[in-house]
Amino acid sequence: MGLFKKLTENKLFESVNNAQQAIKTTGKLISLISDNKVSASVREMLQGLKTILTEKPNINSINHFINHFLLQISPENQPIIIKELLEVFHERWKNVDRKTAEVALKTYDFADKTILVHGNDIAITALVENLNVNLKTCNIIQIISLHDKIGKQQASKIAEIGIPVTVIDDSSIANYIQDVDVVLMGNEIAMHETFIGKTGSFNLCLIAKYFDKPVYILSDTRKILNKKYFPTSVVDMFIGKNKKPIVEIWKDAPSNINVNYIHLEEIPNQLVTKFIFENDAFTPEELEDEVEKTMIVKFI
């Protein structure tokens, strides 16, 4: 039992069976650390799980960690234990984007509005699709950047639904924001006071705030993270600034030029009007209470 002994002693376990299943699953995952077929990113995640088991071994931290772990990996070429977890995970969260879109449509009337969208989020696509099915029109303005493909991907998906899309460069947002009714974007993680979003989210929120335009974040409860359950080193795996290859900005840059490309950034929740999940919509103040409840998925 060794590394997992503390698990069975923790009062947060609801039953012996739950404890045994957690031990079995985490044991299999930890054993993959020495598997040469496991990618470096997955191995890093598994090292984080090992840290949790050593420092904060309770059912909340384990389930919460694995939940976020599965959000960030692809099922391609994974060991069988990870594939099995992903299968359960994806089945559990099937159609969550549509549920989030339905809550959004109850929260704000998007019909006949000009909507500025950022990034590439399936809940945004689901929302536009819902409007289209119900014969409600809207104007979509998609932000893109020259070095990032995700905005183009979302614009293409929306156009395929049958909704015309106006695409603008991210450097020209201020020229369009006054004609916009509402701003929509997804997120990677939602926390007590901040959220993690694609680069450009911070600037967009600031501009929208200046021009008094509402900002709605479409999300789901998988992405809620209560940092108090994790060691700092593990939290940094999720909310640290992720750098991408510099060639995406400047290939073969001259010597003495330091090129940085940050993929994600941390944004204050107070710049957001409401965070919309599959079960409800919350103001930044209300979200703080929800994060404290650690809305987690117990599936292991």
Image (cartoon, rainbow, N blue to C red):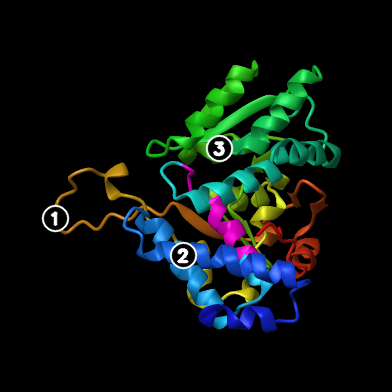
Q: Which mark is residue 181?
A: none
- Amino acid type, mark 1: Ser
Label 3 sits on a secondary structure element that is loop
Viewer-proximal residue among 247 and 189: 189
Structural crowding at the residue carrying mark 1, measured as other residues with C-alpha within 10 Å and reported as few (<14), some (14–19) or many (≥20):
few
Task: Quadrant for the N terminus, please.
Answer: bottom right
Q: Nearer the viewer, mark 1 or mark 3?
A: 3
Which badge, 1 or 3, is on the more N-terminal residue?
3
Q: In the drawing, does residue 294 fall left or right of residue 87?
A: right
In the image, residue 67 lies in the stretch drawn in magenta: yes
Q: Which residues lie in the magenta part?
A: 63-75
- The amino acid on which the numbered mark 2 sits, given as a three-letter code, is Leu
Q: Position of residue 143 (x, y in %)?
A: 53, 35
Which residue position holds label 2? 46
Tell me residue 18's x, y (percent).
72, 67
Marks 3,2: beta carbons within 8 A: no
Relative image position of residue 88 (x, y in whole percent):
64, 47
- Label 1 and label 3: CA atoms lie apart by 34 Å
Task: Give x and y (percent) for residue 151.
Answer: 50, 34
Q: Secondary structure at mark 1?
A: loop
Say left or right for 46 vs 108: left
Disc number for residue 120: 3
Q: State the mark number for residue 255.
A: 1
What is the number of callouts on the image?
A: 3
Amino acid type indicated by mark 3: Asn
Residue that appears at 79% across and 27% down: 111
**Mark 3 crowd level (few <14, some 14–19, many ≥20, 10 Å Cα):** many
- Residue 248, image quadrant: top left
Q: Residue at x 66, y 69 (%)?
A: 20
| Name of the residue lying farthest toward the left | 255
Residue 164 appears in the rendering? no
